Image (cartoon, rainbow, N blue to C red):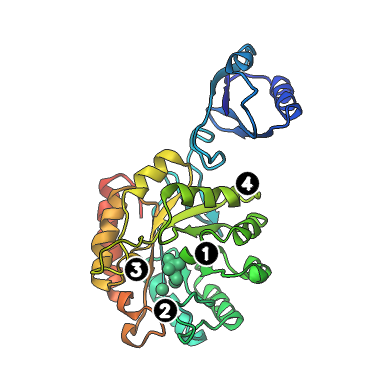
């Protein structure tokens, strides 16, 4: 249930209302916005009547929410959430962000070299997997802790915040200490214990869409993180499984306006995993920006043919630079900076 308060409601009245809901056994969140003060009530509201709440002169409006997600719901929180990743702002009317870097960290020299290149191309953050969720147990599994340390070195040299995938809660302390944006990969989107674990820290989380997840499944996964206490969630669409085999996955661009309407959280797009083909990355990126995406995460490698993972979908730095140049034109056309 969402309760919008009158603009001039005194703090004392807000507190009294808050307490009265808590006494009814409800979990109450107060969202103080620039233009709105809103209460979100979570719990069994079946025994609460709209007209009783409206009897309070400081209440402007009462709405029942049929969607099962509350904290992610835009009705609850009309203003866009802007997630601050070590100084890089994601979401809202802010600049569209670009994250670039290899699928996997392959060593200190490799990640520092590519970090320098993506930085010169205009990237805002560096990606690099150190713990890799590979389909085959015989494929390269990532450098682990050493890879995380290499990423830190690349951050020190370039100043770019770093993004990396966390696969298991037992590495959470390592990630909370060293990684600026914790990625939850498609395969773990419904690993609820992992979602609760990252909900207990304040580090921003990049929540990728599960390959067969509906939009509601995905928002409910964000709800796990939010309800555990971490408000810093960014959605990342990375393509879903369909009957089509021409591309690695099928990019679902419609999620951008849908998530923006339903939730207040930022949405970015991963055209690399969505298409699996470096040639398709630029057109999909242009379309995603036109559709309102808040950012892109793109695999970049200086020697794609010898990359230890996902070379076929990795852009060479020169193509990444050209992609950014063209995306900036679309961003300008819709009134955003990039
Ligand atoms: C990745 O970003 O390297 C990755 C494995 O992505 P996804 O979880 O979307 O497959
Ligand atoms: Mn990859």
Q: Residue at x 51, y 82 (%)?
A: 141
Q: CA distance from mark 4 to mark 3?
A: 30 Å
The answer to whether residue 305 shows anywhere in this view is yes
Q: Earlier in the sequence, mark 4 or mark 3?
A: 4
Give the number of the mark in front: 3 or 1. 1
Q: Which residue is mark 4?
A: 227
Tag on residue 114?
Answer: 2
How many other residues sit within 10 Å of disc 1, few (<14), some (14-19) or many (≥20)?
Answer: many
Label 3 sits on a secondary structure element that is helix
The response on whether ligand 2 sits within 8 Å of label 2 is no
Disc 3 residue lies near ligand 2 with CB under 8 A: yes
Which of labels 2 and 1 is toward the front? Answer: 1
Identify the residue under disc 3.
272
Q: Is 196 in front, or is 303?
A: 196
Ligand 2 lies in quarter: bottom left
Q: Residues within 10 Å of mark 4 (few under 14, many from 20)?
A: some
Residues at marks 2 and 1 touching, judged by CB atoms closer than 8 Å:
no
- How far, Cα to Cα, is label 2 from label 1? 27 Å
Alpha-carbon span between mark 2 and mark 3: 17 Å
- The earlier-in-sequence mark between 4 and 2 is 2
Query: Disc 1, ligand 1: is the CB inside 8 Å?
Result: yes
Quickly name the residue at label 1.
188
Of the residues under marks 2 and 1, which one precedes in the sequence? 2
| Tag nearer the camera, 4 or 1 | 1
């Amino acid at each position: 249930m969402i309760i919008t308060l009158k603009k001039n409601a005194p703090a004392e009245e807000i507190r009294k209302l808050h307490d009265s809901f808590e006494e009814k056994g409800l979990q109450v969140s107060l969202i103080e916005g620039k233009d709105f003060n809103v209460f979100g009530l979570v719990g069994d509201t079946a025994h609460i009547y709209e007209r009783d709440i409206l009897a309070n002169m400081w209440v402007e409006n009462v709405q029942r929410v049929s969607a099962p997600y509350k904290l992610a719901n835009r009705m609850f929180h009309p203003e866009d959430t802007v997630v601050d990743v070590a100084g890089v702002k994601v979401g809202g009317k802010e600049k569209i962000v670009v994250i670039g870097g290899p699928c996997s960290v392959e060593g200190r020299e490799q990640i520092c070299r590519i970090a320098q290149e993506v930085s010169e191309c205009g990237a805002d953050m560096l990606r690099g997997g150190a713990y890799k969720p590979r389909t085959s147990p015989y494929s390269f599994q990532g450098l682990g802790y050493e890879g995380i340390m290499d990423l830190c070195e690349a951050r020190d040299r370039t100043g770019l915040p770093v993004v990396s995938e966390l696969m298991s809660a037992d590495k959470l302390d390592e990630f909370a200490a060293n990684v600026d944006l914790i990625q939850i990969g498609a395969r773990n989107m419904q690993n609820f214990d992992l979602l609760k674990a990252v909900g207990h820290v304040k580090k921003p989380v990049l929540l990728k869409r599960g390959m067969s997840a509906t939009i509601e499944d995905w928002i409910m996964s964000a709800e796990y993180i939010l309800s555990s206490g971490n408000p810093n969630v960014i959605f990342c669409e990375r393509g879903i499984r369909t009957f089509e085999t021409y591309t690695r996955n099928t990019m679902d661009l419609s999620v951008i306006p849908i998530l923006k309407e339903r939730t207040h959280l930022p949405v970015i797009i991963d055209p690399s995993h969505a298409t699996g083909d470096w040639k398709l990355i630029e057109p999909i990126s242009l379309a995603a920006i036109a559709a309102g995406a808040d950012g892109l995460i793109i695999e970049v490698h200086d020697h794609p043919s010898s990359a230890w993972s996902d070379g076929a979908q990795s852009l060479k730095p020169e193509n990444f630079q050209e992609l950014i140049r063209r995306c900036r034109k679309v961003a300008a056309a819709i009134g955003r900076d990039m």
